Amino acid sequence: MKYRNLGKCGAKVSVISLGSWLTIGGTVDNKRSGNLIKLGFEKGINFFDTADVYNYGMAEITLGKSLKDFRRQDLFIASKCFGKMSDEPNDKGLSRKHIFESVHKSLKNLKTDYIDLYQCHRYDPDTTLEETCRAFNTMIEQGKILYWGVSEWSKDEIKNALEICEKYNLHKPVSNQPQYSLFSRDIESNGVQDICRENGIGLVVWSPLAQGVLTGKYNKKKIENDSRLKDKKNNTFVKNFVNDENLNKVGELIKLSEKTGISVSNLALAWCLRDETVSSAITSATKESQLKENIKASETELTEEILTEIEKIFKSVK
């Protein structure tokens, strides 16, 4: 496993991390979740990402039960808040009240005294940005969290947060969690990647395999019954990627895989990690074989020739 600094902060995270959206504490039972977490840790993963809204706390709870068996200093635990957790009017968003209450609930769920990285799951237009920045600064000063970050914020939203923190001498966000893959490249053109690079903000990208489409499994004639595409409750995101044009591109990637001897998923993950601004690629898995394959990407080096071939295949993707 390779490790990179989370942006310009001193903490190092595994370049392949394990997320828990839809899987751990959700579609994957507790025993199998525990086995996946243990395997990931043994293979060098130290960065485990979750959120309070994932299965309404069950992802955090399941993660906390499994991680308690490891030394706390060997782990880098990340969670998030913003999403609606109940019908109560204040149980959502990024107000000081909700951040304070969310952090404490996450600490309880994760069975830990502190959380390494706490993130704004989305931008909150109903709360002043200064209030949000000050609330996260307070949580850091109290030792409840060590760093804070954002997810799916625009260039201007990140820029404004940095300016507020600079003006009032507050702890600045150190990370940004955007969607990024060969099929989702908006951050390359909308200024988000640039502002993160310029300010030392580490990218921890989600869905780097486009919900599994970039593994090539949906190009097979027979799709496994336990695949996300056949899960009618949780297949909304993956359906957005499964179309003839995309599958044709994956077909070309499969040919490149056969030519280079590098698995399709490793080509896609290593492509994300080609830029040092990406501190970690958040992967998920329902099987140990999937997790083992994803972890191999940490040691996969793509030559300029391979990168050029990949760009030729996906050049029309914006």
Image (cartoon, helix red, strand yellow):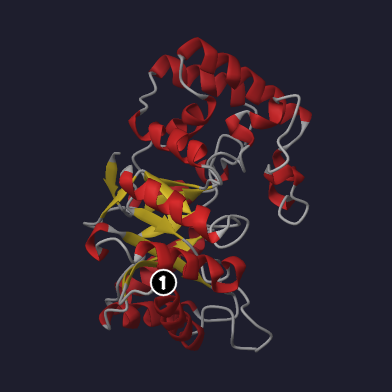
Seen as rendered, the residue at the extreme front is: 31
Seen as rendered, the residue at the extreme top is: 259
Q: Residue at x 73, y 40 (%)?
A: 225
Whether residue 188 is visible to the viewer of this picture, yes or no, is: yes
Quadrant occupied by the C terminus: top right
Q: Residue at x 32, y 79 (%)?
A: 144
Locate residue 59 relative to residue 221 in the image: left or right: left
Image position, residue 257 (x, y; %): 52, 18
Q: Amino acid at mark 1?
A: Leu
Residue on which disc 1 sits = 110
The answer to whether residue 24 is above or below residue 214 is: below
Which quadrant holds residue 317?
A: top right
Image position, residue 24 (x, y; %): 53, 58
Image position, residue 290 (x, y; %): 51, 38
Locate residue 263 relative to residue 254 in the image: left or right: left
Q: Residues within 10 Å of mark 1 (few under 14, many from 20)?
A: many
Q: Residue at x 37, y 74 (%)?
A: 111
Where disc 1 sits, the SS reads helix
Q: Residue at x 55, y 49 (%)?
A: 179
Quadrant occupied by the N terminus: top left
Image position, residue 72 (x, y; %): 26, 65
